[in-house]
Image: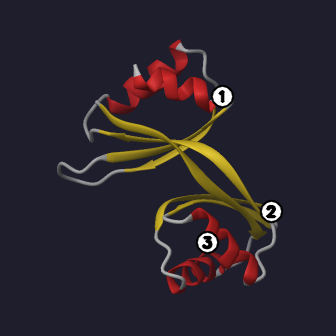
């Protein structure tokens, strides 16, 4: 069920929780030719957190900082490509559970048809997660 597993880079951007901020960030990245491969976010009061996996994390972070988004950080994440079928997430979560890997957060995407589903996972031990998912 698991097609590929690798370590990836995620950009964490902390911003004011206001209308239009995601549109602005997307415009900045698009104007620099940077593709967003995965995105998640949430707001808490006056603050919002955006997690972005981009085609070029370093250029994305530089572009955002140049436009005033100074509160950025880079995280290592586990990127998992898996078959888009029933039970695929069960297989991933079971392997991580059996290996004793603590999942801090997870987000993903899928599409209809035969294309792959994609998960972005932040764990307490990404090396251990990689080993468990490659078995």
**x and y percentages locating residue 55 in the rendered image:** 48, 64
Q: Is there a contact, CB below 8 Å, between mark 1 and mark 3?
A: no
**x and y percentages locating residue 111 in the rendered image:** 28, 54
**Crowdedness near tag 3: few (<14), some (14–19) or many (≥20) residues, C-alpha within 10 Å:** some
**x and y percentages locating residue 22 in the rendered image:** 61, 75
Distance of label 1 from label 3 (alpha carbons): 26 Å
Along the horizontal axis of the image, is 87 left or right of 92?
left
Q: Residue at x 28, y 47 (%)?
A: 116
Q: Is there a contact, CB below 8 Å, between mark 1 and mark 2?
A: no
Rendered position, 101 above or below 55: above
Rendered position, 25 above or below 50: below
User: Quick one: SS at disc 1?
Assistant: loop
| Quadrant position of residue 41 | bottom right
**x and y percentages locating residue 97 in the rendered image:** 54, 18
Residue to which mark 3 is pinned: 59
Rendered position, 49 above or below 61: above
Along the horizontal axis of the image, is 89 left or right of 85?
right
Residue to which mark 2 is pinned: 45
Distance of label 1 from label 2 (alpha carbons): 30 Å
Q: Which mark is residue 99?
A: none
Residue to which mark 1 is pinned: 125
Q: Nearer the viewer, residue 19 or 130?
A: 130
User: Quick one: SS at disc 2?
Assistant: loop
Rendered position, 92 above or below 33: above
User: Quick one: SS at disc 3?
Assistant: helix
Q: Residue at x 58, y 23 (%)?
A: 128
Q: Residue at x 44, y 26 (%)?
A: 133
Along the horizontal axis of the image, is 134 left or right of 47?
left
| Quadrant position of residue 125 | top right
Kindly report which numbered mark, 1 or 2, lies closer to the viewer in this rendering: 1
């Amino acid at each position: 069920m698991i097609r590929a597993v690798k370590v990836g880079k995620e950009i964490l951007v902390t911003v004011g929780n206001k209308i239009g901020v995601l549109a602005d960030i997307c415009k900045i990245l698009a104007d620099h030719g940077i593709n967003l491969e995965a995105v998640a976010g949430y707001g808490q009061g006056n603050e919002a957190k955006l997690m972005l996996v981009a085609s070029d994390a370093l250029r994305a972070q530089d572009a955002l900082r140049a436009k005033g988004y100074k509160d950025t950080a880079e995280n290592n994440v586990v990127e998992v490509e898996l078959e888009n079928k029933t039970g695929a997430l069960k297989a991933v979560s079971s392997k991580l559970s059996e290996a004793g890997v603590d999942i801090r957060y997870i987000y993903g995407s899928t599409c209809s048809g035969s294309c792959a589903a994609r998960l972005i996972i932040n764990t307490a031990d990404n090396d251990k997660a990689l080993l468990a998912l490659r078995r």
